[in-house]
């Protein structure tokens, strides 16, 4: 009887440990989640600036620069996809949109909206293909 109870306890502990491990593996690492969280916050900030008609280069450039720096981390953050040509193309498109925006900062809100829409479009294209 004692062995049966110990066997059942052992099976329960094993099942619990397996569940914990599977959950941890499913969540992945914090690095890609962090990259996406910061990019999302910067995009929300850009949209908020547009809503408030704060479209000067001094308002938008810091956020665009942060997004551009994070654009360099896309392939390393998502290692299984770094050899995927579509992923690399989406990351390149994002960097190109941000480079263009930084090379010629928006002069008014209409131009800024076009810039933000282009960046947002490159994000959506990648999410459509990879986020599922």
Image (spheres, rainbow, N blue to C red):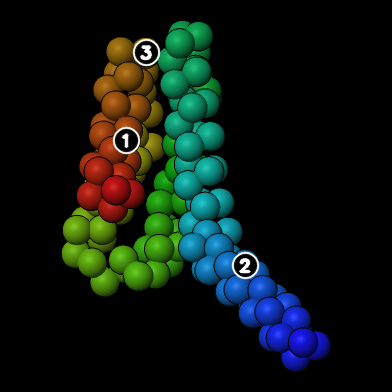
Q: Name the N-terminal-most of marks 1 and 3.
A: 3
Of badges 1 and 3, the one in the foreground is: 1
- Tag 3 secondary structure: helix
Q: Residues within 10 Å of mark 1 (few under 14, many from 20)?
A: many
Look at 75% across and 81% down and name the residue there. 5
- Tag 2 secondary structure: helix
Write down the residue under mark 1.
Answer: 119
The CA distance from mark 2 to mark 3 is 49 Å
Circles 2 and 1: CB atoms closer than 8 Å: no
Residue 128 seen = yes
The CA distance from mark 1 to mark 3 is 15 Å
- Position of residue 60 in the picture relative to residue 11 (left or right): left
Image spot of residue 111 (x, y percent): 30, 18
Write down the residue under mark 3.
Answer: 109
Image spot of residue 85 (x, y percent): 19, 64
> Which labelled disc corresponds to residue 20?
2
Look at 32% across and 35% down and name the residue there. 119
User: Residue 83 sits in which quadrant?
Assistant: bottom left
Circles 1 and 3: CB atoms closer than 8 Å: no
Image spot of residue 100 (x, y percent): 29, 38
Front-most of residues 84 and 97: 84
Rendered position, 63 above or below 30: above
Q: Residue furthest right?
A: 2
Of badges 2 and 3, the one in the foreground is: 2
Q: Name the N-terminal-most of marks 2 and 3.
A: 2
Look at 48% across and 47% down and name the residue there. 36
Rendered position, 40 above or below 32: above
- Position of residue 68 in the picture relative to residue 90 (left or right): right
The CA distance from mark 2 to mark 1 is 38 Å
Q: Name the N-terminal-most of marks 2 and 1.
A: 2
- Tag 1 secondary structure: helix
Quarter of the rendering occupied by the N terminus: bottom right
């Amino acid at each position: 009887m004692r062995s049966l109870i110990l066997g059942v306890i052992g099976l329960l502990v094993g099942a619990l440990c397996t569940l914990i491990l599977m959950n941890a593996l499913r969540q992945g690492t914090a690095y890609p989640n962090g990259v996406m969280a910061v990019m999302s916050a910067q995009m929300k900030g850009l949209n908020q600036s547009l809503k408030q008609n704060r479209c000067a280069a001094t308002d938008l450039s810091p956020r665009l620069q942060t997004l551009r720096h994070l654009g360099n981390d896309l392939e390393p953050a998502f290692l299984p996809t770094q050899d995927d040509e579509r992923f690399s193309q989406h990351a390149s498109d994002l960097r190109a949109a941000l480079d263009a925006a930084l090379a010629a900062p928006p002069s008014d809100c209409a131009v800024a909206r076009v810039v933000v829409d282009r960046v947002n479009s490159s994000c959506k294209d990648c999410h459509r293909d990879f986020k599922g």
